[in-house]
Image (spheres, rainbow, N blue to C red):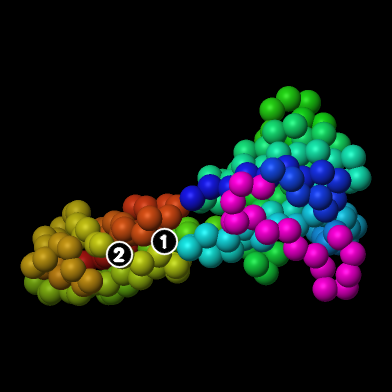
């Protein structure tokens, strides 16, 4: 699905072609929401914004426009929480939030950028509803062993991704003992050192960082 509209001023919506973008008003009344200036880290100042709820089967986000009474802006939504902006008359910035108003990304318009619209993605930004991430892969098991032993290792993630698959390997003074694609991994060790490696992939459609690798060094005596 897709949607398009033209925002005039702070509240007038024209040429609306779909139903995904819905103008919202604050519970306190009025036409605009007072939001912290998202482009300033730790900022305590606020700016008045027009806010749209943007809803698809994947969930809902909030699109905030730093609007004014002279604003004239066409907004196109591709149905997957990606936006194109046209015109941008008397508007400098916009931002995309999740429903808790945690910043996903923000947009800097030509009035400030002096050229094309810039998309800024914070390093610790929130995710779109259709996105997931693996994060860090933590390989657990014995970090020391003795010659002739069999050791078992497992791996976990600290992200939200599902549909995980595992690819195990070991280098150095050890060899696999059994499956290299299961939830756990067995190795037979001999005197020396080894490194156990697990590569985890996700089949989630919106995963942002697949695959991710984790390792564990093993000392063998």
The residue shown at (81%, 38%) is 72
The residue shown at (76%, 39%) is 73
Residue under label 2, please give it: 164
The residue shown at (86%, 46%) is 9
Spot occupied by residue 168 in the image (x, y as percentages of width and height): 21, 60
Spot occupied by residue 172 in the image (x, y as percentages of width and height): 19, 54
| Quadrant housing residue 171 | bottom left
Is the residue 171 above or below the residue 188 in the image? Answer: above
Is the residue 56 above or below the residue 158 in the image? Answer: above
Res 134 label = 1
Question: Which corner quadrant holds the C terminus?
Answer: bottom left
Q: Give the residues in magenta.
A: 16-31
In this figure, what is the number of numbered marks?
Answer: 2
* Classed neighbour count for the residue bearing mark 1: other residues with Cα under 10 Å, few (<14), some (14–19), many (≥20): many
Give the camera-side residue of 33 and 101.
33
Spot occupied by residue 145 in the image (x, y as percentages of width and height): 21, 73
């Amino acid at each position: 699905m897709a949607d398009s509209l033209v925002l005039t001023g702070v509240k007038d919506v024209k040429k609306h072609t779909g139903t995904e973008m819905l103008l919202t008003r604050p519970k306190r009344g009025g036409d605009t929401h007072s939001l912290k200036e998202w482009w300033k880290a730790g900022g305590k100042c606020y700016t008045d914004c027009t806010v749209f709820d943007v809803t698809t089967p994947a969930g809902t986000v909030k699109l905030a426009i730093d609007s004014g009474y002279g604003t004239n802006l066409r907004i196109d939504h591709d149905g997957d929480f990606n936006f194109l902006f046209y015109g941008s008359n008397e508007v400098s910035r916009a931002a995309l939030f999740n429903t808790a108003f945690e910043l996903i990304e923000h947009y800097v318009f030509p009035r400030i950028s002096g050229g094309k619209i810039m998309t800024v993605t914070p390093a610790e930004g929130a995710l779109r509803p259709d996105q997931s991430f693996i994060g860090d892969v933590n390989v657990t098991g014995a970090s020391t062993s003795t010659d002739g032993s069999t050791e078992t290792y497992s791996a976990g993630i600290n992200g939200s991704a599902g549909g995980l698959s595992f690819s195990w390997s070991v280098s150095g003074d050890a060899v696999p003992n059994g499956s290299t694609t299961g939830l756990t991994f067995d190795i037979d060790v001999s005197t020396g050192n080894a490194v156990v490696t697990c590569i985890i992939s996700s089949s989630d459609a919106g995963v942002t960082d697949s695959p991710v690798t984790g390792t564990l060094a093993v000392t063998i005596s």
